[in-house]
């Protein structure tokens, strides 16, 4: 599935670091490795494909104005009339990518209603696959922070499909959305049942992260802290997936922020450090 992991990195950075759009507009700093990738693209791509890939790279770097510019350039590579079926699909793709960029930007500036509306519309399975996947990821993270029953009715069936295909973030969202004191025990029990079985390292880490998040959200801070420390060793040695490492860092950040609310100065400093480290993850890729 192309670009899924880069999409996850972008979605999580916007969700956890806040106000990315204004930062991106003021400082569109493309790291050296990405600059080198951009320089190589014209050697193997041209026309629509080149402009699309350039736009995706700038979008993933949170340079939203530049991304839209390249997606519009992609549109300009198509004939102005009498488009073939394949050209019509490319036109739909470029327009959908512009809308997706608008959604990320709206989310970054805190306009959650507009962002949710865009992601909901763009997650239509009849649309371009790359846009559909990214929109589902984005909308699921947005709704965890800002629940919306109507949007959730549209999103849940799509997450169920993702879950069946072993997308752990879909499983996480389904377990954490609508979490309350009444359903927390059963959700915790379901994860503990999974962990008691014979599962591989990646599945164990994924479920441990989800369990720690649910414990934390349920007010069981001490248990979440112990589990987070227990996870640390395996994440460092065995988590080869950037998405999984980001998930663990986000858990550590949430835990540190919760502990800092109770006057823990070390936790406050740790939270500040984690925000800085997470902000640098994309630049170092």
Image (cartoon, rainbow, N blue to C red):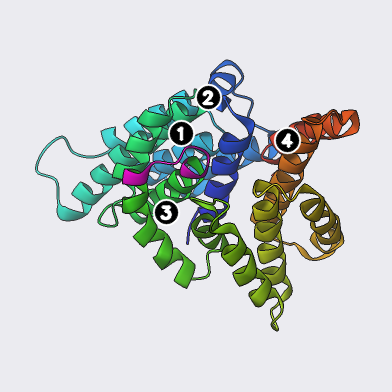
Instruction: Decide: few, some or many residues near mark 2? Use Cα within 10 Å; few <14, some 14-19, many ≥20.
Output: many
Q: To which residue does mark 2 refer?
A: 21
Upstream in the sequence, badge 3 or badge 2?
Answer: 2
Splitting the image into 4 quarters, where does residue 96 fall? Answer: top left
Residue drawn at (35%, 34%) of the image: 98
In the rendered image, which residue does mark 3 sit on? 133
User: What percent of the width, then of the height, locates residue 32?
Assistant: 70, 34
Of residues 231 and 63, the one drawn nearer to the viewer in this rendering: 231
Q: Where does residue 172 sit, x and y in percent of width and height?
A: 56, 58
Crowding around mark 1 (Cα neighbors within 10 Å: few <14, some 14 to 19, many 20+) is many
Q: Earlier in the sequence, mark 4 or mark 1?
A: 1
Q: Is residue 70 visible?
A: no
Residue 224 location (% of width, % of height): 77, 53
* Label 4 Cα crowd, 10 Å radius (few <14 / some 14-19 / many 20+): few
Lower sequence index among marks 1 and 3: 1
- Residue at the image position 50 percent from the left and 51 percent from the top: 177
**Number of numbered discs visible in the structure rendering:** 4
**The C terminus: image quadrant:** top right
Callout 1 touching callout 2 (CB < 8 Å): yes
Q: Is-magenta flag for residue 88?
A: no
In the rendered structure, which segment of residues is drawn in magenta? Answer: 143-150
Q: Earlier in the sequence, mark 2 or mark 4?
A: 2
Reading the image, the residue beneath label 4 is: 280
């Amino acid at each position: 599935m192309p670009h899924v992991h880069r999409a996850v990195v972008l979605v999580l950075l916007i969700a956890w670091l806040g106000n990315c759009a204004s930062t991106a507009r003021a400082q569109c700093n493309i790291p050296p490795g990405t600059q080198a990738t951009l320089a190589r693209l014209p050697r193997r791509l041209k026309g629509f494909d080149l402009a699309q890939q350039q736009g995706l790279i700038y979008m993933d770097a949170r340079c939203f104005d530049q991304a839209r510019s390249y997606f519009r350039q992609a549109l300009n590579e198509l004939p102005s009339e009498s488009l073939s079926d394949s050209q019509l699909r490319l036109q739909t793709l470029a327009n959908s990518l512009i809308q997706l960029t608008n959604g990320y930007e709206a989310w970054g500036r805190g306009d959650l209603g507009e962002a949710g509306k865009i992601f909901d519309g763009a997650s239509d399975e009849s649309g371009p696959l790359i846009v559909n996947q990214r929109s589902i990821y984005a909308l699921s993270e947005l709704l965890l922070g800002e629940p919306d029953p109507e949007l959730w009715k549209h999103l849940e069936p799509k997450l169920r499909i993702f879950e069946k295909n072993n997308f752990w973030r879909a499983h996480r969202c389904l377990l954490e959305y609508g979490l309350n004191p009444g359903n927390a025990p059963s959700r915790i029990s379901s994860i503990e049942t999974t962990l008691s079985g014979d599962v591989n390292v990646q599945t164990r880490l994924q479920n441990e992260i989800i369990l720690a998040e649910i414990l934390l959200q349920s007010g069981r801070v001490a248990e979440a802290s112990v589990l987070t420390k227990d996870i640390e060793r395996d994440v460092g040695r065995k988590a080869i997936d950037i998405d999984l490492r980001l998930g663990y860092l986000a858990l550590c950040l949430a835990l540190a922020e919760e502990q800092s609310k109770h006057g823990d100065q070390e936790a406050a400093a740790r939270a500040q450090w984690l925000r800085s480290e997470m902000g640098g993850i994309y630049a170092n890729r």
